[in-house]
Image (cartoon, rainbow, N blue to C red):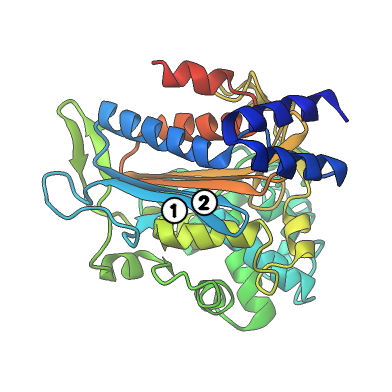
């Protein structure tokens, strides 16, 4: 028996009694991995830290869910939908997912690619003929796969400023004729929102069905994501929606919901509640194979490009041995595990979703404020989950 298993067994015996001892012994004898942490205990500790940080940062409202396999271990809310008003955040309160929307677009595209509606190696200009770089031959090298892996070669966030000025993609696309990639498409990483969202055109041209309808029929309905939707109009139509809040000298202030990134729906246009995100986590971890098959999940989480600069992130740098990007997902290696992760940030909202590929445990967090505390909260749980608890301990003692 390996020394790590012996240590885990002793911990189980001390903390949980003989029954858990024998369960752990059975796992070891079968060659199955034993858990580094007790998920129920970790969930309780996370809840304590979540509430501590929400109060300390005076965040108006938020919600989280922790999923272990196909079971929700913990799901709870905090605060109000709008600062200064009584309406509380509940499990069905709708938030903007911002860039976590990319996980939906990539999932939908991967399902369709596996159904042979199009190919990853198809040229983007086949579906979006008006796209052209300064050097036209380079735009003709851009493949569908490059859109979803941020490997177009362009400078990061190209023309996002036009999205922030509420310009539709039809007005932004001609701007790409003024620039060229820094490297050959497929060779280097550069995060994009405008180009990523061209997958909507690919999906429609290849299937004749709109992106919004595809999500509703293929994901939202079968997964019973009852509050999920796409677009500004759908968000505003919900009576149980969180308001966006921005930081001012006098604290958090609610602001109006801008259309801006809704024009790039695959990149940042999905709305959902924390109850919806519980279902989305289960699907991503393989528990709804009729919706997302094992081969689809494997394809999405196969690295397309390394993201070396993420190794230097202040929170993750002491723990990551590798960082990359698949299709709509960040891929972080910690020890012998991989964390499949994405965060989102759009005016007044933050969102994060992550799960352990090895342990099949995941977390989603939604906030109605532009606070960086969400990164600390996500990392706190993930690093504890993988057994690298130094950060969790240090943060809990703050």
- On the rendered image, what quadrant is the N terminus found in? top right
Residue 128, position as x, y percentages in the image: 65, 67
Q: Which mark is residue 269?
A: none
Is residue 398 or residue 318 the one in the foreground? 398
Picture quarter with the C terminus = top left
| 345 relative to 173 in the view: left or right | left
Secondary structure beneath label 2: helix
Which residue is situated farthest in the front direction here?
A: 18
Residue, x 31% and y 44% (percent of image)?
348
Q: Is residue 32 above or below residue 37?
A: below
Q: Nearer the viewer, residue 17 or 320?
A: 17
Whether 317 is drawn above or below 13: the answer is above
Image height check: is 325 above or below 230? above
Which mark identifies residue 100? 2
Residue located farthest toward the bottom when viewing the structure as drawn: 208
**Residue plotted at (52% across, 63% down):** 279
What is the quadrant of residue 47 in the picture? Answer: top left
The dot on residue 97 is 1
Tell me where residue 296 sits by quadrant: bottom right
Q: Is residue 293 above or below residue 314?
A: below
Q: Horizontal and vertical percent for residue 369?
A: 31, 41
Residue 189, visible in the rendered structure: no
Q: Residue at x 56, y 55 (%)?
A: 102
Answer with left or right where residue 298 lies relative to residue 195.
right
Cα separation between marks 2 and 1: 5 Å
What residue sits 26% from the left and 31% below the top? 55
- Is label 2 in contact with label 1 (beta carbons under 8 Å)? yes
Position in image of residue 73 (x %, y %): 50, 50
């Amino acid at each position: 028996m390996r020394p790590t298993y012996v240590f885990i067994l002793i911990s189980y015996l001390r903390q949980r009694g003989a029954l858990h001892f024998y369960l752990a012994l059975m796992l070891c004898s079968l060659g199955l991995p034993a858990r580094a942490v007790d998920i129920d205990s970790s969930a309780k500790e996370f809840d304590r830290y979540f509430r501590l940080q929400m109060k300390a940062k005076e965040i108006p409202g938020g919600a989280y869910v922790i999923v272990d396999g196909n079971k929700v271990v913990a799901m709870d809310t905090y605060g109000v939908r709008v600062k200064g008003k009584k309406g509380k955040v509940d499990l069905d309160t709708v938030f903007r997912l911002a860039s976590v929307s990319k996980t939906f677009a990539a999932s939908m595209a991967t399902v369709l690619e596996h159904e042979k509606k199009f190919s990853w190696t198809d040229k983007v200009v086949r579906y979006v003929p008006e796209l052209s770089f300064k050097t036209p031959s380079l735009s003709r090298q851009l493949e569908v796969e490059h859109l979803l892996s941020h490997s177009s070669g362009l400078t990061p966030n190209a023309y996002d400023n036009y999205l922030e000025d509420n310009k539709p993609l039809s007005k932004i696309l001609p701007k790409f004729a003024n620039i060229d990639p820094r490297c050959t498409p497929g060779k280097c990483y550069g995060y994009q929102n405008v180009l990523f969202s061209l997958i909507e055109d690919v999906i429609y041209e290849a299937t004749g069905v709109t992106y919004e309808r595809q999500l509703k029929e293929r994901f939202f309905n079968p997964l019973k994501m009852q509050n999920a939707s796409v677009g500004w109009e759908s968000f505003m139509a919900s009576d149980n929606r969180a308001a966006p809040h921005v930081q001012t000298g006098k604290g958090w202030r609610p602001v109006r919901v801008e259309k801006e990134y809704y024009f790039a729906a695959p990149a940042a246009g999905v709305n959902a509640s924390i109850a919806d995100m519980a279902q989305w986590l289960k699907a991503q971890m393989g528990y709804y194979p009729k919706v997302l098959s094992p081969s689809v999940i494997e394809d999405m989480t196969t690295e397309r490009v390394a993201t070396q600069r993420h190794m230097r992130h202040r929170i993750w740098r002491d723990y990551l041995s590798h960082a990359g990007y698949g299709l709509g997902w960040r891929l972080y290696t910690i020890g012998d595990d991989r964390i499949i992760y994405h965060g989102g940030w759009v005016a007044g909202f933050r969102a994060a979703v992550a799960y352990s590929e090895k342990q099949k445990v995941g977390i989603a967090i939604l906030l109605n404020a532009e606070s960086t505390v969400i990164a600390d909260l996500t990392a706190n749980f993930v690093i504890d989950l993988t057994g690298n608890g130094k950060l969790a301990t240090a943060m809990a003692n703050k």
